[in-house]
Image: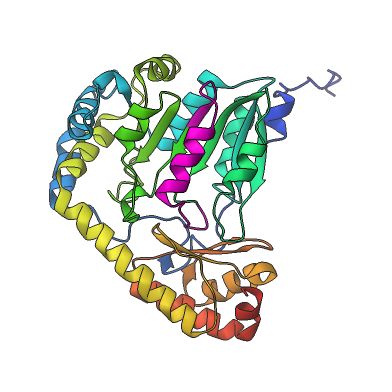
Amino acid sequence: MNTRPTAATPTPRPRIAALPVYSRAAGSASVRWRASSNESTVAPSPAIRAAVARAAAHAHLYPSLAGDDLIAAISERMGVREDQVVVGGGSLALLQLALTAFTGPGTEVIHAWRSYEAYPILIGIADAQAVPVALDHEYRHDTQAMLAALTPRTSAMLICDPNNPTGTALPPRRLRALLDAVPSHVLVLMDRAYQEFDRTEPDAAALVAERPNVIVFRTFSKAYGLAGLRAGYAIGSPEVMRAVRATAPPFGLSAVAEAAALAAWSDREHTRHIVDTVTESRETFRRALGERGLFTPDSRANFVWLPVGDRAEALQAACVRRGVSVRAFAGEGVRVTVGCPQAEAAVLAAVDECGDRAASAAQ
């Protein structure tokens, strides 16, 4: 008989052990259509697929140290210096680098809520304190409340615009007023993952040029249709981006992802096709929901927010029964990725099944 005492197992930091878990959409592995992850419904173009194949043929070699070719291409089009650009495995990975560089124990990070559910996780990993601020009655960032949340411990403010999961965006004037009111020593982290779907998008290069404390994060996952390859970029002042770059691991962007991102960056017609597909579906879907008495906020993203309150999980279940996954947030609402008419028809059938209960909950 083994009489050795049971060995203790390694224990994570308390903050890590207490982190929330990123949620999964119900039924996403078994449904016919996936409208739960804000992916593009349009496959990569032939030019992008060819670039991926060429890069994959050399997968035995390391990629460039920092994604040099992609940095050069972004720098040229955006009109910024190369030392103002950092690329990596998705905008979320870059956001983690920035939080690591500029926040930490004893600091606070202000962010809207509900917003992207990864934010409290990333802030916790950085060992900073998340300060959530409720959205306003229009499901937008409450700019005055966010400014009122500033304290001497505030090291950063996170702005998700257009906001995930509500799809709402601040009018450019309100956004600029918010940025102007944030103290210059507080880093502003602007998550613009859905910028291409917003026809009133602010100029990222101009925002950074005017405000050295701003970093703008962008992704190739949405309008460029590369969610499965994980590529993103961030733009900021040279001084701020030097600190972000210092926290980045070498070879953080795979050669295949960089090749795909470069091809997508050049294939503007394909990007326009993705954006047009989304915007047309988005407005058609919102009209159909409105005809059913279900209010939805004005979305500037590739999804629509259904604020159905405590009917969220019932509506999600009804969608799964009809072969489409959506993302439910219990007690708040349901987010539906748009761009596939068949998936949207299935969601509308689920809304019809839930009937007046869903519509009344959204009033």
- Residue found at x 39% / y 34%: 216
**Residue 359 on image: x %, y %:** 60, 79
In the image, taking residue 9 as reference, residue 76 lies left or right, namely left
> Which span is picked out in magenta?
164-188
Instruction: Between residue 316 and residue 338, name the one nearer to us.
Output: 338
Instruction: Between residue 255 and residue 276, name the one nearer to us.
Output: 276
**Residue 174 on image: x %, y %:** 47, 47
Quarter that holds the N terminus: top right
Q: Which quarter of the figure has residue 262?
A: top left
**Residue 150 on image: x %, y %:** 65, 32
Q: How is the image coloured?
A: rainbow
In the image, taking residue 58 as reference, residue 247 lies left or right, namely right
- Residue found at x 21% / y 59%: 273
- Residue found at x 31% / y 56%: 199
The answer to whether 312 is drawn above or below residue 56 in the figure is below
177 falls in the magenta region: yes
The answer to whether 305 is drawn above or below residue 51 in the figure is below
Instruction: Between residue 215 and residue 227, name the one nearer to us.
Output: 215
The answer to whether 23 is drawn above or below residue 335 in the figure is above
Q: Can residue 88 be seen in this snapshot?
A: no
193 falls in the magenta region: no
Q: Can residue 188 be seen in this snapshot?
A: yes
Instruction: Between residue 10 and residue 198, name the one nearer to us.
Output: 198
Q: How many marks?
A: 0
Quarter that holds the C terminus: bottom right
**Residue 164 on image: x %, y %:** 50, 52
Q: Which quarter of the figure has residue 248?
A: top left
